[in-house]
């Protein structure tokens, strides 16, 4: 019997996947022994989860353990998705995309019952956006990338954008064409601004890039694509779309090179016409070097004219551009497919008429151009273009612009749109994806989206009940999460969202285009949700580990996320009361409102500083960690500060606004205090606030702030909350105690 059992065990082990087994160990540690993975190739993506009951066989010094959970699938990607399905639905284990967020494991894994089988509804599951590499990932080390790649595999993502490290390739290309080291590195933008350089929107801003950056990112990309391929993914590498350096244009006056339209106040960039012989030569040089460095899976991203006008709008010209881009790829890689985002067709929809778009898209052979319908929660471009004239496309949810920390997204409406698309579209809808500009503070939207790729006709209410249990391991919050989903999560994200707190200070309005404090729900509803979330836990005795949320990082995350949003919304009433007092020339009331504002700033910053996902410190620390010298560390920190605040010009100021601990206290609060002081001074002197002069003063503060190097903690901060400010029976976390103080100070009383 022992020999037979060993033989069976060895056979099963031979069928298991080493890649997904290694993933399971990274996530579960020693508890990975509760799982066995069996790969059974198939023509469709599927997974099966079961818990066969097998008695342990014992002999002399030999124990064959019970096989607790068995996961079968057609490849590593499907197996990983099956693992995550089990962890979330049976054992309450949530794996965040951030490495800093701890994975909390149960003492015992639950039985499955009947075997569960799921099949993917679409072939491709896409993730990322050029911008994500600037708003979320520019400072990541391999440790952070490793967790994120695991997260993608656990969510069945098999087509990730993989554009890290391409500057190392371009460095060799431009050197081949005679440019000097200084010319090449000065052409590149700073690390956080590289996405917009890669999309030809700007050149050189925040440069020159240190050579150590190029070397570091090259090594990192090699690890990234190797791991993604191990886990059954098809990384999308970049290709040449026509963007060339100004110096290259000067060196080749005979070439057909034109300047594109200026983007957001930056100097126009240079575009090499795809019909020029140099175009195919550069494509060949770039792709050959890229494939040598990073390998290939035969799919390449190229996005000419992002948010810009092409040199000509004639249909024949547009047809030539796309045809030449594709064939220049195919001449290097005969299996090449081209992936393009369709954001520009939405953003410039008045210019991209039906006939122009038809000419551009149909010039590429069918099935050789894959399109990302980029912003489907807002506008499904495929519906207005005859399904992109037959070219395959991926239905994408964008969801976040710039990393704004706002509660947005609507699962109910998402389900209606996506469900209808799956019913209405023909065979050319090949995938589901997300093109978020930055990682969001509403993770449930993305969890739902990628689970939807495997779940036909889901029940949203039932799914939300499961999500509530996943966050707290308790059903007490089921109604709270339903209310949150049905009432607060109503609006789609759009560029320029931000609470009044993070807006550039003004008496009326919201300061800049990119800080619209818009929300369509009642802040009183959010207050009730916050009260429910905090009050349930106050009912339990100390060390009562049956209580919801005790020790759960996800519960602490939700407290910070929801309470800080309520506080950010509430600040609007303080600003408005200050403005009314200003108009009434009531100095006493103006000072009172300013004092209230500072109390709010202090409380919300303290709350945000209890969780690393809402802190400025880790962002700065990660940036500085990449520097090999003090000057490099200072350079990276300046880049990290700039992208979050002034961005790089007056047009995009505050675009990437975020309510983060440290940033609220040291940046947004100080801006508002400059404003309060200027307005109070004007009233005291019997005059009016000179808003133009104040704007100049504010700009001076903002530009000085990005050059500073004051320290921000990278770890959660213990808060000094008086024992009298929370229930004596409670022995909860700093997050809970700080939220309780906010609840009592701001939500239970009128201010």
Image (cartoon, rainbow, N blue to C red):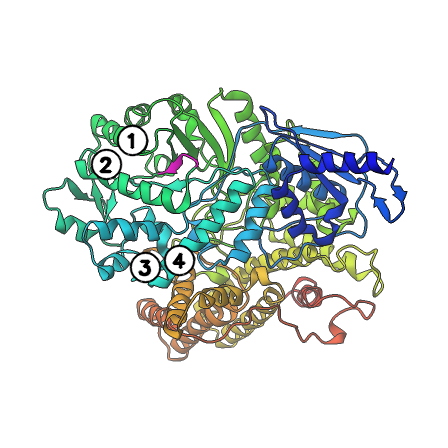
x and y percent of residue 9 in the render? 76, 37
Identify the main secondary structure in magenta.
Answer: strand
Mark 4 residue element: helix
Residue linked to disc 3: 650
x and y percent of residue 56 in the render? 87, 41
Q: Earlier in the sequence, mark 4 or mark 2?
A: 4
Crowd tier of the residue under label 1, counting other residues whose Cα lies within 10 Å: few below 14, some 14–19, many 20 or above: few
* For the residues bearing labels 1 and 2, Cβ distance under 8 angstroms: yes
Q: CA distance from mark 1 to mark 4?
A: 33 Å
x and y percent of residue 644 in the render? 43, 61
Q: Earlier in the sequence, mark 4 or mark 3?
A: 4
x and y percent of residue 10 in the render? 74, 37
Q: Is residue 171 left or right of residue 68?
A: left
Q: Nearer the viewer, mark 3 or mark 2?
A: 2
Crowd tier of the residue under label 2, counting other residues whose Cα lies within 10 Å: few below 14, some 14–19, many 20 or above: many
* Identity of the residue drawn at 28% across and 51% down: 172
Residue linked to disc 1: 331
Q: Is residue 506 above or below residue 97?
A: below
Mark 3 residue element: helix
Mark 2 residue element: helix
Which stretch appears magenta?
297-301
Please tell me in which quadrant of the rendered image residue 694 appears: bottom left
Q: Is residue 559 above or below residue 690?
A: above
Q: Which mark is residue 599?
A: none
Can residue 511 be spotted in the picture? no
Q: Which one is nearer the viewer's eye here, 597 or 138? A: 138
Q: Residue furthest left?
A: 254
Residue linked to disc 4: 192
Residue linked to disc 2: 280
Q: CA distance from mark 1 to mark 2?
A: 9 Å
Q: Is residue 51 left or right of residue 702?
A: right
């Amino acid at each position: 019997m022992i020999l037979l059992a060993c033989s069976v065990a060895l056979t099963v082990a031979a069928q298991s996947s080493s890649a997904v087994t290694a993933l399971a160990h990274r996530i579960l540690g020693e508890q990975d022994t509760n799982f066995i993975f069996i790969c059974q190739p198939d023509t469709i993506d599927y997974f099966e989860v079961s818990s066969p009951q097998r008695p342990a066989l014992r002999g002399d010094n030999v124990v064959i353990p019970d096989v607790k959970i068995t996961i079968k699938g057609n490849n590593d990607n499907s197996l990983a998705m099956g693992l995550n399905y089990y962890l979330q639905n049976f054992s309450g284990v949530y794996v965040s995309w951030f490495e800093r967020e701890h994975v909390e494991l149960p003492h015992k894994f639950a039985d499955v019952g009947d075997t569960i089988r799921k099949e993917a509804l679409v072939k491709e599951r896409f993730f990322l956006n050029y911008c994500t590499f600037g708003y979320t990932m520019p400072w990541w080390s391999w440790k952070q990338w490793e967790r994120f790649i695991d997260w993608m595999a656990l969510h069945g993502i098999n087509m990730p954008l993989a554009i890290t490290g391409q500057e190392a390739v371009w460095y060799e290309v431009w050197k081949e064409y005679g440019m000097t080291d200084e010319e090449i590195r000065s052409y590149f933008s700073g690390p956080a601004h590289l996405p917009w350089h890669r999309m030809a929107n700007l050149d050189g801003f925040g440069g020159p890039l240190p050579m150590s950056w190029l070397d570091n990112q090259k090594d990192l990309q090699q690890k990234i694509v190797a791991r993604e391929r191990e886990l059954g993914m098809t990384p999308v590498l970049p290709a040449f779309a026509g963007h060339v350096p100004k110096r290259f244009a000067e060196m080749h006056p005979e070439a057909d090179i034109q300047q594109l339209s200026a983007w957001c106040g930056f100097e126009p960039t240079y575009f090499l016409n795809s019909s020029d012989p140099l175009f195919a030569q550069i494509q060949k040089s770039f792709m050959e070097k890229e494939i040598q460095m990073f390998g290939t899976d035969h799919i390449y991203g190229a996005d000419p004219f992002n948010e810009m006008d092409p040199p000509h709008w004639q249909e024949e010209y547009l047809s030539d551009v796309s045809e030449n881009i594709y064939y220049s790829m195919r001449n290097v890689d005969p299996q090449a497919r081209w992936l393009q985002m369709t954001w520009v067709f939405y953003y410039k929809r008045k210019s991209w008429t039906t006939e122009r778009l038809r000419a551009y898209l149909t010039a590429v052979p069918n099935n050789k151009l894959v399109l990302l319908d980029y912003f489907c929660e807002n506008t499904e471009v495929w519906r207005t273009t005859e399904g992109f004239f037959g070219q395959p496309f991926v239905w994408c949810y964008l969801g976040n612009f710039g990393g704004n920390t706002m509660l947005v997204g609507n699962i109910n409406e998402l389900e209606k749109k996506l469900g209808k698309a799956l019913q209405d579209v023909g065979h050319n809808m090949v995938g589901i994806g997300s093109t978020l500009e930055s990682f969001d503070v509403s993770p449930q939207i993305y969890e739902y989206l990628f689970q939807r790729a495997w779940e036909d006709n889901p029940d949203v209410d039932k799914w939300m009940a499961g999500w509530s249990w996943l966050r707290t391991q308790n059903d007490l919050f089921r109604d709270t999460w339903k209310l949150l989903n049905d009432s607060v999560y109503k609006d789609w994200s759009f560029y320029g969202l931000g609470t009044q707190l993070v807006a550039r200070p003004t008496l009326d309005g919201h300061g800049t285009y990119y800080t619209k404090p818009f929300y369509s729900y009642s802040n009183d509803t959010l207050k009730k949700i916050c009260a429910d979330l905090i009050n349930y836990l106050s009912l339990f005795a100390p060390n009562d580990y049956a209580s919801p949320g005790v020790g759960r990082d996800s519960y602490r995350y939700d407290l910070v996320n929801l309470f800080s949003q309520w506080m950010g919304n509430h600040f609007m009433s303080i600003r408005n009361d200050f403005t009314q007092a200003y108009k009434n020339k009531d100095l006493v009331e103006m000072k009172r409102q300013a004092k209230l504002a500072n109390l709010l700033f202090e409380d919300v910053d303290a709350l945000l500083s209890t969780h690393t996902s809402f802190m400025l410190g880790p962002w700065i620390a990660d940036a500085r960690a990449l520097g090999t010298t003090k000057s490099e560390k200072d350079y990276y920190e300046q880049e990290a500060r700039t992208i979050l605040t002034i961005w790089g010009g007056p047009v995009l100021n505050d675009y990437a606004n975020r309510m983060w601990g440290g940033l609220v206290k040291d940046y947004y609060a100080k801006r508002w205090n400059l404003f309060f002081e200027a307005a109070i001074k004007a009233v005291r002197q019997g005059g009016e606030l000179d808003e133009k002069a104040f704007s100049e003063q504010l700009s001076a503060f903002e530009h000085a702030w990005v050059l500073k190097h004051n320290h921000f903690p990278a770890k959660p901060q213990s808060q000094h909350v008086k024992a009298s400010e929370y229930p004596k029976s409670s022995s909860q976390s700093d997050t809970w105690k700080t939220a309780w103080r906010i609840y009592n100070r701001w939500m239970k009383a009128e201010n």
